[in-house]
Image (spheres, coloured by chain):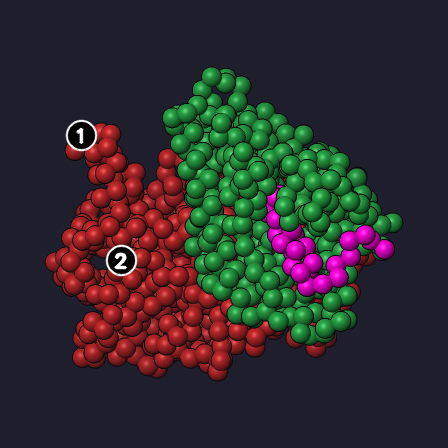
Chain colours: A green, B red
Amino acid sequence: MSLHQIKDLAGLHRHLHAAMQLEHATIPPYLTALYSIKPGSNIEAFDIIRAVAVEEMLHLTLVGNLLNAVGGTPDLTVPGFVATYPAMLPDGEEDFAVNCRKFSPEAIATFLKIERPARVDQGDQGGRTVARRKLPGAIQAGHVGDDTEEHFFSIGEFYKAIERGLDHLYSEIGDSLFCGDPERQIGPEYYYSGGGALIAVTDMASAKAALDLIAEQGAGITGSIFDEDGEIAHYYRFQQLILGRYYQPGDQRDNPTGGVVPVDWDAVFPVKTNARIVDYPVGSDIRLAAENFNRIYASFLARLTHAFQGAPEEFIPAIGDMFHIKELFYQLMRQPIEGNDDSNAAPTFEVNQTPQETS
Amino acid sequence: MNGTEPFAIPPEVAFSTTYDVAIVGSGVSGALIAKTLGANGLKVLVVEAGFGEDVTISDYSKSIERFYSQVSKDNNAPYAHSRNAPMPRDYDAIKLRDGKPNDKGYLVQNGPFEIDSTYSRVLGGTTRHWEAKALRMLPDDFKMQSAFGRGRDWPISYESLSADYARAERELGVSGNVEDQEYGGLTFEDGYVYPMKRMPPSFLDKAIAKDIDGFEIEVGGETFELHVRSTPQARNGIPNPAYDGGKGFVPKGAVSIHQAEMGGRCQGNTNCVPICPVQAKYDARRTLLSAMDSGNVHLLPRTVASRVEVDGTTGQVTGVSCKTYKDKDALDHTIGRLKARIFVLAANAVENARIMLASDLHGSSRLVGRNLMDHAYLLTWGLMPEIVGTGRGPLCTSGIEDIRTGAYRKHHAAVRFSIHNDGWGWATGSPYTDLAELVDTHNLTGRALRNGLIDRVGRQVLLDCMIEVLPEETNRISVDPAYIDQMGNPRPVISFDIPDYTLETASFSRRLTRRIYQRLGAEDHTAYDPLAPGWVTHEGEGFTLRGGNHWAGTHIMGSDARTSVVDAAQRSWDHKNLYLAGAGSMPSIGTANTTLTLAALCLRTADAIITEFAAGKNASQMSNASQSVTA
């Protein structure tokens, strides 16, 4: 059995907070790679990364629904919610850190690690977890004790642990586990992208359906390329960029046989990896723009928090916010950093940081 | 569609197979029929004159880029021109002089009126440039002769078509709300909701509603109260959880044979015509690709139907001769023959008539090609007193529908009005022309130019007046050996005039829109150029009327072989195994864009074909050749 079984409601809430952080932690790296692609080039790659990023937003919302359903309170504004890059994922994979970097083979290699399938031999046991000492780059909600945090090999195993915790608590307290206000659920009308849909979580069946969707769209629990709806898992979507072909039904893993996926690694803004505000000269336009980005992003997260805390209709203006954020991305990424001929600017995502991170 | 490659089948395979049904045209009519038949196990071939591109995201992006880079942003600007399957272009329409036809474009315009309407010969047909308005026709529109002593009655009623409208709204994915459609006798099934909620009204809609809602006008002795109402449209919006008895609706998104982008909701790019950058707008590729997913539907692109072959004794169609090309423009092509038990021409009202007439098939009623209809659009435009956010949202989110029917139709044509979120673009070429004017005439630069553009463009309002045209036998498509295309196929020759019945409503609409602009406190900037194509005069006043791309009537539907071309199922009276599908069958077009209605008709046609096969009249097996083919 795992060392860190979820034994109580507080533990479930903490894991779901971590899951929201985890889903969000993928978004700055995905968007940085996405918008570093020069408009009009790398159409296939743009589309693949965008599709995954949009589904991570779906997963974030599904976890928010689950947390609301079990009486928790989603909050995307708590200090440390936004990771500091390079970041260790909040579910605790030890062997890689996630960077915000331009569209590149290195970026895709990291994306593949983020979305890697669960180890089949570990899945039954709720994932391999070990304790490790707290690291400065890791995210707060992943901490389970004063000095330790838990580790999973993959996101899939992390969710498996949540599911086991859910089962455990349900066996103890039954339907009263789902004590949240149903009015807070974000329904299917607020999202669609063809792949999956928002599920309002009100009972065990809908909770399981939400977790299944996250797992299927990510790595696929069993590592299969297509899920039962015929949708291709994120891991294999990204792999198409490295292998240069689309997967089609009937293909074997690592051997896609569909149409060609052309990639032009040079048609990319050479943005600085893990840019920080301090990288931009004091008083420069770039610095002002980057600070403005962080302010806008913080207010966007505040709007989402408001939406999760009982105002679902706020998801509609949040769509406008996302267009604004895209424009601000391009505004920065088109600009070379003064005194640094090799690198263009990029958003820094230094938003609502913990005192430790800002120090 | 999860990716079947190759996407199209080779011509030699298509031509050596005997299908249950062969369909000419991959537009909304052909695709809907193919999908319904394929789902019922019939083996279907769809033939498309266009190149058959745009089944991947990157191909689609190329069309968008082509549109962005074109100087003339006409309806077919996103699509590469092809000498082998040429398309009408808006800019081909010129003012006719001295009774000489204009044969500069693909269409030969005989006049006296010049239509600037077009259609698209590409995969998915003209839905590749349509705006996606999906209004139902009104009950009165189906009985023009009996209700108003004008035009023709349909052999079917609104009530009997209502369920098929609902099916079409599902297939096309219509956003709308029933509450806004309660006018003009429209009825819906109890509890019916559209698949998706209405497109949110634009700021401009609300600004206009403030001054127009409740405005009472008198037309033909009847008093009407005007209201701004949302326009149903086949554009992805917010799915309605109450749809289908609470089952909800799952919108279909972008089309791709590779799984990439999975769909888009309207983002308000105001670029609906000709091409939606995020594929929120329905086009027939969605239906076609899901038809092909059944495994029963094959696609043969780059193939132009040239002649329908008929058995002189039985009148049965024995085949359709086709020409298949490899290169868009090169001269060479190969000739083949479609073999099937049932044939469907679904190439739109102009091309269906052209193919029939090129085959010397005028119909026993001699009405093939006649009764050509299209909507006549009178455009009016002005500047609102305040900035109204022009350029946000789909082209139109609302309209004024209250006088779509009334006793006045005994005397003049019906009309509806659309409120345009895209400013004066359709009428003047704005915003590009505004920029040129502010720079060249007003000598503005820098900040003054920016502010000038915001002030000019941001206050623009355009009301289009969509006016009914009734069927008249002298308005027609014909063919003439003097006009052939590169492949040797005759080009469509158009003879058209705007009837007084319609012109009277043009005058009325200009008067009414003047009053509307007065109520809005807007400056009326409407002006018509006597040298422009579409210039007409009526009782001392001149207008330019624009085409609506709603070609209809050329194989008109009726209850009698002597006075119509097809029956209520769109089956040819003269050729029992031939269906002529699409707006060409419509005996009236009222004030609704034709697509939703023709989609409903085509679903009925598919039902009729399925019934026919089920009854065993055409019971048959695929030939051996076809069984070895997988789509």
Residue B392: x percent and y percent?
36, 51
Q: For this view, does B513 lie left or right of residue B54?
A: left
Residue A353 x %, y %: 53, 41
Q: In this figure, which residue is indicated by the disc labeled 2?
A: B463
Residue drawn where x is 49% and y is 27% of the image: A278
**Type of amino acid under label 2:** Leu
**Label 2 Cα neighbours within 10 Å, binned few <14 / some 14-19 / many ≥20:** many
Which residue sits at x=19%, y=73%? B217
Q: Which residue is mark 1?
A: B443
Residue furthest to the right = A121
Q: Most extreme residue toward the left, as rendered? A: B540
- The amino acid type found where label 1 is placed reads Asn
Q: CB atoms at circles 1 and 2 under 8 Å apart?
A: no
Q: Find out whether residue B602 is within the magenta segment.
A: no
Q: From the image, give the main secondary structure of the stretch colored magenta.
A: helix
Residue A8 counted in the magenta span: yes
**What's the distance in space between the residues labelled 1 and 2, CA to CA?**
30 Å
Left or right of B20? Residue A72 is left
Q: Which residue is at a point 30% across and 53% down the rendered structure image?
A: B546
Q: Tell me if B45 is positioned left or right of B282 in this view.
A: right
Q: Which mark's residue is nearer the viewer, 1 or 2?
A: 1
Write down the region rendered in magenta: A1-28
